[in-house]
Structure formats: C-alpha cells, structure tokens
Image (spheres, helix red, strand yellow):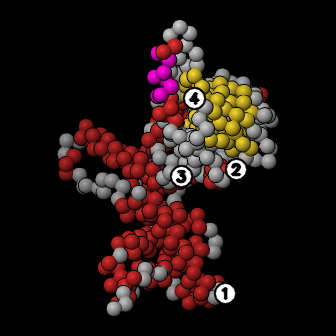
Amino acid sequence: MAETTERHLTEDDLASIATGQAPGPDAAAHLRSCPGCRLDLDRTERVVSALAEPVTLLEPPAGVWAGIERELGTQQDPDAGPGASAVPDASADPAPGRHGGGGTLGSDEAGTVAFMPRAPRRRWPIITAAAAAGLVVGAAGAAVVAGLLGQGDDRQDTPPQPVAVGEAVLAPVTDREVEGRAEMVAEPDGALRLTVDVSEGPQEGYYEVWLRDEQASRLISLGTVSGQSATLPVPAGVDLGRFPVVDVSQEEFDGDPSHSGVTLAAGPMTRSGDTTAG
Amino acid sequence: MREAYDQHGRLVFSLCMAALSNRQDAEDATQQVFTRAWRSRQAYDPTRPLGGWLTGITRRVVADTFTARDRQRQLVDATAGQHQRQDRQLSEQVIDRVLVHEALDKLGPPQDEILRMAFVQDLPQGQIAEQLGMPLGTVKSHVHRGLARLRAALEVNDG
C-alpha cells in the first residue's frame, strides 16, 4: 500500500524530463497528483526552451536615463550608478529642496524634487535582524489614537493640549552606538507629530526617520534629521498598528530615496501610560 | 530610481527591443516604463520583486505603443486593416527568453557557462565535464542549481 507517488521530483528528474526524456512511472504518477511539481516542471521546460532561443540583451543608451530625468525633473546624479561613492559635494551644495521637509508631502510639481519614491526596494538584513531580536511591539496604535482623539470633551475648561500617544526607546543597532527616543503626540486638531532625539548627530550625510513594520518590509519615511533632534509630521491616516517601529537610518546624499539599509537605532512604539504591552 | 534603472534597465530595454523591433521606439518605451514606475510608485509592493513589477509595466507600455502605431498608421493609410498583423504584444515566450537570459548572465561562472554548453549548445553533460576538466557530478549539480535559479527568474514574472 506504500504511496510511491509521495516523492517530489528532484532537480535531476526535472532536468531530464524537461530535456525530453520520458518520466519514469513513479515520477509520472507523482506529476499527476502534485501541482507543485507540475509547476516546477512547466517552468523548467520554459527555461530550457528559452535558453535554446537566442536573445539580444541590450543596455539602454545613455540618452534614455537623461530622458527619464528630464521627464521627472529630478536632480539625480547621472553618474551615481551602483557602487558609485557617496556624493562628496553634497554638503557644499545646499540646493533648496535637497534636504527636504516632511517625507510624504513631496510632489512632482516642485521644480526641484527632493523626494524620491517612498517604496523601498531593498532587503534590510540589519534591521530585520534587529526586529527578529525580540523587539516587543505595543498594541494597535491607530485604535489608541482614535481613542485619545475622542477624549477631551470632559475637560473643556482647560485649553486643548497635545496628547502623548506613544513613545519609543531607540536602541543602538550599529557599533556607532547611536541611541535615542521618540515621542508621538496628537495635536488638538488631530495632527500627529513625532519628535525624535538622538544621542549623536550625523557625522556625514543625514539621518532619516521611518515608521515601519517589524520585518522592515514596509516603511514610511517621516523626514530627515540633520542635528540631534527633529519634530516631524506623521501623515494623517497612517495605521500605527501596521507601522509600529520607529527607525532612524543613516543616509547619504546619493539621491537614492530608499532606506539605505543602515539602521542606527530602532525601537517599537509603546502606548503612552500603558504598561501591559501587547 | 537610479538603482532600479541600473539593475533593470537592460531587462526593460531588451524586452522593448524584442517586442518593438525598433530602436527609437524601444528607447521611448523604456523611458516611459521608468517614468510610469516612478509615478505609480505608491502601488509597488516592496515585498514583491521589482523586476516583475517593471515587467508588468513594460507589457502595458508595449501594448500602448502598438496601439499608438495603429492610430498613426490609420492616419496615413486608409488600408490599415490589410497590413500584416504583427505580434501585437509582448509575448510570454519573449518575456521568458529575456528573463532567462538576463538571469543566466547574472549567474556568473562557471554556472552560466555550463548552462550555455548544456542548453544553448546542447552538449551532453559528460562532454562538458571533459571539456572543463570537472567531475561529472559537479557539472550535474551546477546544471541543477542553475536551472532552479533560472526557474526562480520566471516566477518573478508569473507573480
């Protein structure tokens, strides 16, 4: 009664079937019952036939990138390819817009586009490791904010004050030992702000502050820090439950808008006054 | 953006060339792909491979280019319908071909060379082993691992 069809196809099976050999009876039976192996075989066959067809891979001519830049009106350095060193003249180039304000407020219409795509596209091994190292995360922040904003009706005799929503202790991630803390407040009008203080300002480049999930697969840039402190607007409507971690990264003036991959300090936001994390 | 272009510019341009068979059109299309990508960057899910997303945009730009060509042709030629119908879009085979060869280039030695010998030149693995002075088992395992990696390149497009 032994199920001989349980065994998945090996690479060897896949390669030989894809190159035209008939599958053995076990493999054939398995293929009938295993969609995963059928998909693998299908892809292997596509690879083998694609390899047999010649194709010309062409680098786009230089004019194409220039056209993209022109159309987007960006100021990206055309020479800053991968591996290009950090742009050294950045500090001598205080072009307006280059240092930017609130991250997500950028738009394409300003002549100088300071803001780069907010969609990160790299993996962040460092911060992922930090996240996996057991940073405990406070509960769904959005609900907290909603709750706090609903309050205040019974305190009409005092002028409205900003309400602390949450705070985060930013633990050092690199051996530069930069640490800090962040506090988020809700203004009476509902606007959220995050104040970040760090133990040491940037030696070169600048810092960027992010809200992200624990895996660092989703990030929202809040803005930059050039000194040791900054208060940054938080976009209205952000779900703090999905972006519970505050992250401060080291960035270079390379025109690359994504997270550099170097997190200096990070920590989870906990609800203010809440000691029962979770 | 520049990084995306450096990593995937060749893929996008090669796809456009393969589909459009016209250098100027391919350049324009490549430019459009990246400007569209930039403008719709909010829609990009960073947990998915960037190459797959760009390939999807390339598909749409190529389709739009064909539509624009048709329109152009109708303006100058009332008998447009009688023109030989070309392949009007980026076919799956063409995408597969470009993705696989692009990934093959990135495999690096000796795996890329071994796969070329095995599947482009169609040499038996025994002969490859002999030519490269490598044990047959090593050649086999390069072939297997290489195929697995090229398969992964296709997954990017399959979504």
Percent x, y for residue B59?
Answer: 38, 50
Q: Identify the disc placed on residue A159.
A: none
Q: Secondary structure at mark 1?
A: loop
User: Which quadrant of the figure has residue B129?
Assistant: bottom right
Q: Secondary structure at mark 4?
A: strand
Quarter of the image for the C terminus of chain A: give it. Answer: top right
The kind of residue tagged 4 is: Val
In the image, residue A151 lies in the stretch drawn in magenta: yes
Mark 3 crowdedness (10 Å alpha carbons): few <14, some 14-19, many ≥20? some
Q: Closer to the observer: label 4 or label 2? A: 4
Q: CA distance from mark 3 to mark 4?
A: 42 Å
Q: Is residue B156 left or right of residue A256?
A: left
Q: Identify the disc placed on residue A165.
A: 4
Q: Which residue is mark 2?
A: A83
At 75% across and 29% down in the image, what residue appears? A228
Q: Is residue A202 left or right of residue A37?
A: right
Q: Are marks 4 and 1 on the same chain?
A: no
Seen from the viewer's position, the closer of residues B139 and A130 is A130
Q: CA distance from mark 4 to mark 1?
A: 67 Å
